[in-house]
Image (cartoon, grey):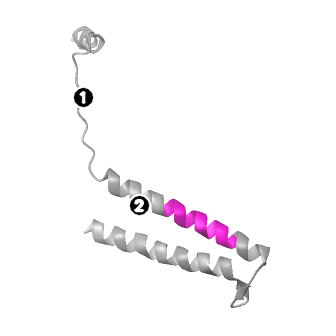
Amino acid sequence: RLNSTLDKIEKGDIEVNLNHTGLDDLKNQLSVSLIVSALIIGSSLAIVADKGPRIFDISAIGFIGFVFSAILGIYIVLRYMINKN
């Protein structure tokens, strides 16, 4: 039995079909999550650098980055909650 299966594999007679469902949404969610994490790290570095204009006594670039990260983070959570149902 094993020999016949191995012979079929060697001859290329075995065909495997794979259907992926939901991987596109997962890929998009993972991409946005990586962007959010990069924005958080970059914003933190901008705040620590303490250069440029200031908003609420912190770097404006860092503040804007954190706001944008928060918006994207909320988007990820809402999208997850909607797709979960």
Q: Residue at x 30, y 11 (%)?
A: 10
Image x and y of residue 65, in percent: 60, 75
Image x and y of residue 39, in percent: 59, 68
| Residue hosting label 1 | 16
Secondary structure mainly formed by the magenta segment: helix
Most extreme residue toward the front is 52
Q: How many marks?
A: 2
Q: Is residue 45 above or below residue 11?
A: below
Q: Is residue 16 above or below residue 68?
A: above
Other residues around mark 1 within 10 Å, as few (<14) / some (14–19) / many (≥20): few
| Residue hosting label 2 | 29
Label 1 element class: loop
Of the two numbered discs 2 and 1 on the same chain, state the one appearing first in sequence: 1
The amino acid beneath tag 2 is Gln
Q: Is residue 4 left or right of residue 78?
A: left
Quadrant occupied by the C terminus: bottom left
Quadrant assignment, res 6: top left
Q: Is residue 39 above or below residue 68?
A: above
Q: Residue at x 49, y 63 (%)?
A: 33
The amino acid beneath tag 1 is Val
Q: Which residues are magenta?
A: 33-44
The foreground one among 2 and 78 is 78
The foreground one among 4 and 68 is 68
Quadrant assignment, res 42: bottom right
